[in-house]
Image (cartoon, grey):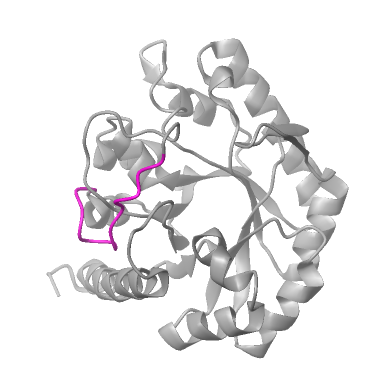
Amino acid sequence: MAPRISLQLYTVDKALAPDLDGGVARLAAIGFDTVEAFAFVGRAAELRTAFDAHGISARTGHAFLVEETIPLPDGTVMTAPSHADTFAEASALGIEIVIDPFVGPDHWTTREGVERVAARLNAAAEEAAAHGLRVGYHNHDHELRPRIDGKPALRVLADLLDPRVVLELDLYWASAAGIDLVPFVEELGDRIVAVHVKDGPMREGISTAQVPTDQTPAGQGDVRLADALAAAPALEYAVIEFDGFDGEIFDGVEQSYRWLQATLAGSDATATTGVPA
């Protein structure tokens, strides 16, 4: 079965902030019935009301699980909500998988650092199970550039994780880190249950240290999205996201949605019949 098409709401946050209901209505009009929430602790009820009004659910959500304090780009420090509050709000919103979106670069350069991340995710998975939830981790480029025993640090993490902990592989950032997507996705296998679908020109120097603004709708850049999607055997969610986009954001989102619709429909038909659609 083809994965569900979703959207990381951070992509359209500037539109949702002044008019949550209106923004969610625009997403429903595009065709979304699933989204990925972020910063949902403390506003699950508000989000649920808007989602329910337009036939949308949040099946995945981003929340910090590993770090208790998170440095922000403006120099301030954010205190992450407790795991208890995070999982309670996730349950209230209908989320199934709570995904940690960021652990800083310093923790990915040594095996000890990666072991610490794995231990905290494994502990969070135990807590989440009591709420009927799963947990996962979402990468950028800095988890894949360092090599530990010849493997990308994220691959080392995967070997240390409890089987209940899943991965959401950001295909754009993995490509930016020089990863050959298809064999990497195949190697991680069932561990990958979600991907971030984003595209753009690939060149030297792409990094979260300075996020590019020339990302493109899916299928219009250099990322091997279609091949990576076809290589993931346990994929449940294909999540559209833009970190930086120069065009009208809802237009970019809709173009990505239509491309994913066509691509996943073709992949599903090929898997079912054994011949290209």
Residue 217 position within the rendered picture, expressed as x and y whole percent measured from the top left: 29, 63
Residue drawn at (12%, 70%) of the image: 276
What is the quadrant of the N terminus in the image? bottom left
Q: Is residue 17 above or below residue 121?
A: below
Task: Look at the image and say whether residue 215 sits in the magenta stretch.
Answer: yes
Query: Residue 30 occupies which quadrant of the picture?
Result: bottom left
Residue 50 position within the rendered picture, expressed as x and y whole percent measured from the top left: 68, 81
Residue 7 position within the rendered picture, expressed as x and y whole percent measured from the top left: 49, 66
Residue drawn at (40%, 68%) of the image: 249
Please give left or right for residue 127 compared with residue 50 in the image. right
Residue 265 position within the rendered picture, expressed as x and y whole percent measured from the top left: 27, 75
Q: Is residue 28 above or below residue 225?
A: below
The one nearer the camera, 199 or 162, is: 199
Query: Residue 169 occupies which quadrant of the picture?
Result: top left
Please give left or right for residue 236 compared with residue 37 in the image. left
Task: Look at the image and say whether residue 2 sits in the magenta stretch.
Answer: no
Q: Which secondary structure is most common in the magenta stretch?
A: loop
The one nearer the camera, 200 or 271, is: 200
Residue drawn at (41%, 27%) of the image: 144
Numbered range of the magenta stretch: 211-223
What is the quadrant of the C terminus in the image? bottom left
Q: Is residue 232 above or below residue 68?
A: below
Please give left or right for residue 229 compared with residue 20 in the image. left
